Image (cartoon, rainbow, N blue to C red):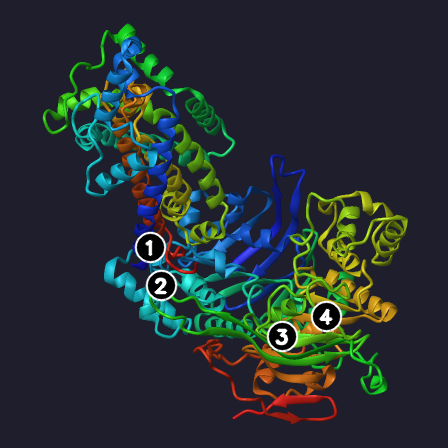
Amino acid sequence: MTSLLSVSGLRVGFGRDPKQNEIVKGVSFDLDAGETLAIVGESGSGKSVTALSINRLVDFGGGRIIGGSITLKRADGRVLDITGAQEPVLEKIRGSEIGMIFQEPMTSLNPVLTIGRQIEESFRLHRGLTGRQATAAAKDALDRVRIPDAARRLKYTPNQLSGGMLQRVMIAMALACNPRLLIADEPTTALDVTVQAQIMALLGELKRETDMGMIFITHDIGLVAGIADKVMVMQAGEAVEQGPLGDVLDQPKHPYTQHLLSAVPHFESGRAARSDFSRTQSEAIAPALTVDGLTVRFKVAGSILTRSPGSVHAVENVGFDLMPGETLAIVGESGSGKSTTARAILGLVKPTRGSFSANNGTIVDGSDPSVQMVFQNPYASLNPRLRIDSILAEPVIAAGSRIDTGTREKMVALLKRVGLPENSLLRYPHEFSGGQRQRLCIARALMLNPSIVVLDEAVSALDVSVQAKVLELLVDLQHEYGLAYLFVSHDMAVVERIAHRIAVLYAGQIVEIGNAASVLSNPRHSYTKRLISAVPSIERRNQHFELDTRQVPSLVRPPGFEPPPAEWQAYGPDHRARAEA
Amino acid sequence: MSYLARRLLTFPLVMLGVSILVFVAIRLVPGDAITAMLGTEAGLLTPAQRAALSAYFGIDKPILVQYWSWLLGVLQGDLGISVIHGKPALTIILERFPLTLQLALMSMCVALLVGLPAGVFAATRNEKMSDLAVRIFAMIGQSTPNFVVGLLIIYALSAGFGILPAMGEFTPFFTDPLRNLGQMILPAITLGFAFAASVTRISRSAMLDVLSDDYVRTARSKGVPKRSVIWRHALPNALIPVVTLSGVEFGYLLGGAVLVEQIYALPGLGRLVLEAILQRDYALVQGCVLFIAFNFMVVNLLVDLAYVTLDPRIRLGEGN
């Protein structure tokens, strides 16, 4: 008996001369029905190209299969050689026997067609359904992925749904015709962690219901534990290790797998929290930053005749202090107000209310050189037309100083300090990798000797092993310069590695704040508990999350609305949570 | 639809601005209606005669007074009397407009029927020989002035086939459709030539962008056949820039196409404006420009409304 999918010696190249530019270099694996294979690797490892080769979508991206074979056992028992198949045959296979879901649900659905039409299309193509039958089938498909109120949602266009909902629509579409094989290419990478948990739970349930084979591609080895039966680790186009889940996670043989498992931040429920700073010792020292009652509201525009229906309460009465040498992590999901908080402190958003004061007693505003920032996307936050020396000179010029030999010496010293070669000054941003660019951004932030650095998702766009190194650098710099970090992130594993204290933001308000180890190991607020239980962990094997379809409440409040004052409950010397009704 | 209402409210404001501009601009040009009408003989007029004529045409009053009395007329639907034609300006404009509208519509049809398929075809064969051929052709089309195209078409037809384009008295469409189309088809092709080239180029590049979008990959992963991927999934997303371009070009065409009307001897708006300017027929120039500006705004409004039907992400009337 042959397996559902059998790949052997697969080689894929790109460009005019594919043999010269090989991205996948001889990958082999087998997959049975009902089995899940996880392919793990960093960007550029060839994991997505391998996946796209299985339904030959790689042809459309400029790739060519130059060696090896892929065979699929079809529903009728015949074995199809996919590498040699013609396009008309492949069109029949795609969607009906091989379904696929992608990383970005926001861009993976056609923006001008209703989701109903997009789901119906699969039934029209592969099942020959038309009209009302197709609509009914599409509604069933949405029901299956637990989208409430499916009949009405069919008429929505993608811009009317959230990322998590769209990914469910994608799954509904991919599973419409009961494919025997589902390829999921980083299906949760773009989603919030609790939404990710929901999608993972859904995939797990559907897999059990349908007995399909699944290929799950991810860079997050923690996510693998929850869903995979087998794991294949890829590096630079080769499968460096593969085997059953337990073997790979517990006895990794290849050094790269060991590296992935050890160097990459995994969530350890507070056990890996930092212990190099203690608040109690430094009570006499003034805080580097005090934020009090920060409130940011955006007025919702009314039409010409109607009054504004109210305001979006993006940040509501947020207060905390930050000691020199301390890291406060602000965690929360998209829309929780964490980035708005950071931007308000930087003076990029005008707060409706509230005050900040820095250590020297002055009110912080956008031009205060003691507060600097590092942003999420190092590819977008460096001007591609400026040389590195100009980029580093920018904050100095903005602060009204002149560029002299002292400034240049400082540039050289900082570049060396963040681990970049000395000749970097005369180069341009495109000559650097993502990790190096983020080091440049850090160097730029340090040009004015700040006391506070705001890091807004500063490592989120980086590959996992690069993440670990940048985090290390940040910790070293913190010790060296006594910097206070305000670290905004959605990634609990990263937060655990860098934070001394954590503030959990939900719907614009802090619901829990305190010592990192205490908050992570013993969360008290129901939202924090939900957030932490959603974080994937290599220790929880094939444990399924509960499906939770609760939505974040709307933040739009009527004009003049004031939330009731918060009641706090203390759970230790430095750990308090908002009391819940 | 408060958006529509707000847009319509801006119409009178723009029209007022346009009217002031054109009123002043035409009076800055040396010469007046009397000189234009009498030519060199105007020099023989005695000052008294000249003053009498000025008073007759109403150009002896201060410019503000002239403007005000003209504006009052316009508000009542009276664009003034054309000096050269001796008829109300609006009547003359409305006589000429159907031809210009028909010519613009036909040129746009030619442009879209040729340009869209050519652009889509080129995009799907990116960097192949056929793509290159389409691109070269489009480049030539865009860079050839339309009077050259018009003359070449006439020359080729007459020298090659002995056919002359139907000239003579213009026949409106509803009088004799066949004869009308015979007169209009060549000018439409001439005007549509460069238009089609622009449409080709813009639809090619828009399609290329769209074809590399994620949702096109999704469609393929569902097993959607190639033809359907292109026409059903990609093209609607690529249409926005094509609509923008077509709207602008169409707006220009509604202002008349002076050279092409001249070559094919068509009495359209373009020639009317030209005559009016040369003869210093103030009322007619002002009326024409106002009329053209109005059309342009209507076309732009239609383009905006087209965006909404094409792309559900665009919601008019939100924000600002």
User: Can you give x and y, in whole percent of width and height, for residue B53 in the image?
Assistant: 23, 21
Quadrant hosting residue A221: bottom right
List the residue tagged with mark 4: A265
Kindly identify the amino acid type of the residue bearing the numbered disc 2: Ile
Subunit of mark 3?
A
Q: Nearer the viewer, mark 2 or mark 3?
A: 2
Q: Is residue A224 above or below residue B249?
A: below
- Parent chain of label 4: A
Instruction: Identify the element where label 2 is drawn.
Output: loop
The alpha-carbon separation of the residues under discs 4 and 2 comes to: 52 Å
- Residue at (44% x, 32% y) in the render: B201
Q: Amino acid at mark 4?
A: Pro
Q: Which residue is mark 1?
A: B6
User: Do we see residue A244 in this rendering?
Assistant: no
Report in which chain the residue with disc 1 lies: B
As measured in the structure, the alpha-carbon distance from the residue carrying label 4 to the one carrying label 3 is: 12 Å
* For discs 1 and 3, the disc positioned in front in the rendered view: 1
Tell if the residue under mark 4 belongs to the same chain as the one under mark 3: yes
Q: Earlier in the sequence, mark 2 or mark 3?
A: 2
Look at label 1 and name its amino acid: Arg
Q: Is residue A14 left or right of residue A108?
A: right
Q: Are marks 1 and 2 in contact (CB under 8 Å)?
A: yes
Are dots 2 and 3 on a single chain? yes
Mark 3 is on which residue type? Answer: Pro
Element carrying mark 4:
loop
Q: Are marks 1 and 2 on the same chain?
A: no
Q: Report which residue position mark 2 lands on.
A: A304
| Image spot of residue B244 (x, y percent) | 39, 41
**Dot 1 crowding, Cα within 10 Å, few <14, some 14–19, many 20+:** few
> Disc 3 designates what residue?
A536
Q: Chain of mark 2?
A: A
